[in-house]
Amino acid sequence: MATIKDVSKLAGVSVATVSRYLNKNGYVSKEAGETIAEVIEKLNYRPNNIARSLAGMKTATIGLMVPDILNPFFPELARAIEDAANDYGYTVMLCNTDNDSAKEQKYIDTLLHKQVDGIIISSYGIKPEHLSSLQKQSIPVILIDNVFSSDSVVSLTVENERGGELAVEHLLERGCSKIAHICGPLSITSSRERTAGFENASRGTDWFTPSLIGYSDFTVHGGYTAMLELLSIHPDLDGIFASNDLMAAGALKALQESGKNVPRDVKVIGFDGIGLEMMTPELSTIAQPISELGKTAMDSLMGLIRKESDILTDQVFPVTLIAKQSTMTN
Amino acid sequence: MATIKDVSKLAGVSVATVSRYLNKNGYVSKEAGETIAEVIEKLNYRPNNIARSLAGMKTATIGLMVPDILNPFFPELARAIEDAANDYGYTVMLCNTDNDSAKEQKYIDTLLHKQVDGIIISSYGIKPEHLSSLQKQSIPVILIDNVFSSDSVVSLTVENERGGELAVEHLLERGCSKIAHICGPLSITSSRERTAGFENASRGTDWFTPSLIGYSDFTVHGGYTAMLELLSIHPDLDGIFASNDLMAAGALKALQESGKNVPRDVKVIGFDGIGLEMMTPELSTIAQPISELGKTAMDSLMGLIRKESDILTDQVFPVTLIAKQSTMTN
DNA sequence: GTGAAAGCGCTAACAA
DNA sequence: TTGTTAGCGCTTTCAC
């Protein structure tokens, strides 16, 4: 593989000049530039990124930590981030943490020593103290769906609570008169917020009772069993708000298997807006702007990396109701 | 951040000794080792991977090229690969190619200059000539679901054709008497093979006719429209084999919306074995050993990287029939 | 405009 | 067993 030295020799200039040419900083005469270009072409020379990084430049690599790429929310996020990173000439290292604190720590350590330029974290086990090593090195971090009151970290979240309210309001509007809720892990902030939204909109109504809330875990299977249980306690429920789409899909399955017609007998709405287009009926949902979240995360991270923006403003994104067949009034 | 120099000074030994200690090669006296360990602890020292890489060692990074992480097959594969890589102390760079030749080329170039130790490609646009730059650098490549007759590349595939036959045999066994097929992109080898399997098992039967094959694109929507079309030509079909699960899900949806009961009126089977547990009825499928594929890919790659195995044996993995509700009799 | 030279942090001969 | 030292390929002062 050709090195900068080879180029400089063949072009009859010093490596410094070639370097300047490559990085488009400092002065390089037109002639010199042209011969260098030719030689580079001829030798099919490409700068060695590792050497570049060592010499003090950036690695042009970021880390992306997600709980589990198998959960369909995260591929969407990952894809948006990867696309944006790609536009910046950056490359993404994927880390699955399973929300396991130890794994998260280990990955942070690994990424740190691979000298990534920044990290996007969308994993829920993270606590501020885990990030201290990053802050020491002043490696920028973007947090998705998780908030710390910390200086060197910017958080991107969505209106989870408002989304929960919206979901209930929508079901009421569509004629539901007894709405149950399948909530997600209580350890996850955004999950708790969605449930808070449900409670805001339900508490005080004449039908509300705490046993209308089923506790689950953001999985299809969890949604399925929670639904069966809710159905056994409240056979007359006619609306379900699940805190994510996967559980909503599980609930739908349970309802169908219990002989309930959706949306006629029971209406169902989820949260997230992942594309579960294969469901029949298709699921209504409170959609997060996933792609926008991903792109913004990468844009903000680049801002921090390039130190263009010192201002670390957390952002809250709006959610939107997407009404599909599962909440239709026929 | 502490460097090896800091450690060597504080421990009163040379950097070489520290390096030997770190890499567990060469001799280091017990005492020296102990003090070094202490100092490392005290300084919270971690070797700089970039410097290590530059000094000739490996980058402990591999590239993973997939068409699109949004397609649920690839997160499963990616997860298995990432887990295995993690066990080896390796890190994975994710690249979405959209099966676009230009993107693939660009990523190969990028990965090359990031000095990855190896690449796993599960993207279909790749052609042998794209890999020449990698071979020049003798960077090992594992190909999943794609075969070249090339020396420095090992291919991992599954019994696609046999799977197609199995699917038809299963449907016949379950009483189907007119089976249609939704095939995937003809540009993809494995897709063509599955269709060949369908044809092997169908051609020669009294019900077979070429118009029972619908052409589609591996997406839910594609499966949906293909199904509607097939249904309009052959309203009496009673079995469907789709070349992947996504299309099978789309077909199921189309059937249900057309008032057909699955599995009573029409039985459906897909291919891949991605977990679409939210479907009602759940889909039968010809499952690939996705996790095993991923793990084997990483294991083989490590073998090549460590030059343990010079023998580049392509492997063909078996598929297994997973019968679920969608092909149940009565 | 350009070049010489000093690193970046680490590994790996080679000597001792 | 250990230390010295020459790189790995590139960037970046600082003179010229």
Image (tube, coloured by chain):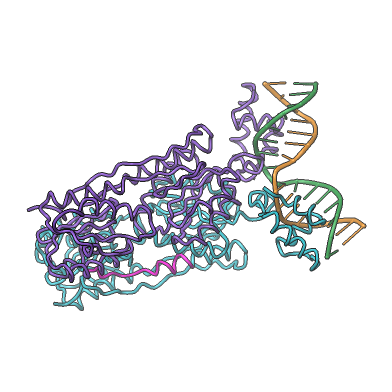
Chain colours: A purple, B cyan, C orange, D green
Q: State how many labels appear.
A: 0
Looking at the picture, how far across and down is residue B202, in whole percent? 22, 70
Q: Nearer the viewer, residue B22 or B167?
A: B22
Q: Is residue A227 left or right of residue B161?
A: left
Q: Is residue B211 left or right of residue A311?
A: left
- Report which quarter residue A188 is drawn in: bottom left
Q: Locate residue B269, reporting x and y percent.
A: 24, 68
In the image, the segment drawn in magenta is B282-295
Q: Position of residue B299 (x, y in %)?
A: 53, 66
Quadrant in the picture for residue B103: top left
Say which residue appears at 73% left-offset and 61% top-offset: B38
Is residue B286 magenta-colored? yes
Q: Quarter of the image containing the N terminus of chain A?
A: top right
* Horizontal relation, residue B274 to residue B174: left or right: right
Task: Name which residue lies at 11% across and 57% down.
Answer: A177
| Quarter of image, res B77 | bottom left
- Report if residue B6 lies within the magenta region: no
Q: Is residue B111 above or below residue A304?
A: below
* Residue A274 appearing in the image: no
